[in-house]
Image (cartoon, rainbow, N blue to C red):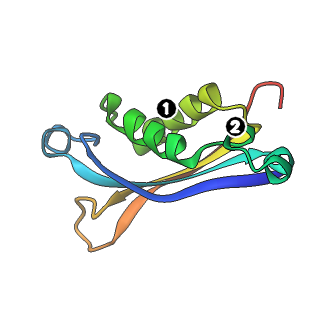
Amino acid sequence: MDTVFVEAIEFHAYHGASDPEQQVGHRYRVDVRVRIDTSAAGRSDALGDTVDYRALAALVVSEGRAERHRLVEALAQRIADAVLAAFPVQGVWVRVTKIAPPMDVMCGGAGVEIERVASGG
């Protein structure tokens, strides 16, 4: 199985465990990989035979801004579900990073990685 990926998709959204986080918002970075057989696209050189990574990135941003979540786990699940529903893929891996989260220590980011398979896959 092959992988199509988009890395470091960044957007501002209003997720967070605390009410102040949800009011101020944060920058998020999402990496996404989908599992798909790309052999038809390799032979045809046709975009219709693969996943358009521009559409994949646009979906991530749309889902990332669609509604507020307390946990990045919930945001990652929402993105994974949307990708599986929108594209003919066998699986998806999503990494959501909250850039510079509000903590008592300095860090460049914190987040979660999830992997989901398509039903029947």
Residue under the point 22% across and 41% down: 18
Which quarter of the picture shows residue 104?
A: bottom left
- Horizontal and vertical percent position of residue 120: 83, 25
Which quarter of the picture shows residue 69?
A: top left
Mark 2 neighbour class, 10 Å CA radius: few under 14, some 14 to 19, many 20 or more: few
Relative horizontal placement of residue 100, taking residue 75 as reference (left or right) = left
Relative horizontal placement of residue 90, taking residue 112 as reference (left or right) = right
Residue bearing mark 1: 78
- Horizontal and vertical percent position of residue 8: 45, 61
- Answer above or below: position of 19 versus 11: above
Relative horizontal placement of residue 114, taking residue 119 as reference (left or right) = left
Q: SS for tag 2?
A: helix
**Amino acid of disc 2:** Gly
- Horizontal and vertical percent position of residue 31: 52, 55
- Answer above or below: position of 82 versus 22: above
Choose between 74 and 17: the one closer to the eye. Answer: 74
Relative horizontal placement of residue 102, taking residue 35 as reference (left or right) = left
**Amino acid of disc 1:** Arg
Q: SS for tag 1?
A: helix
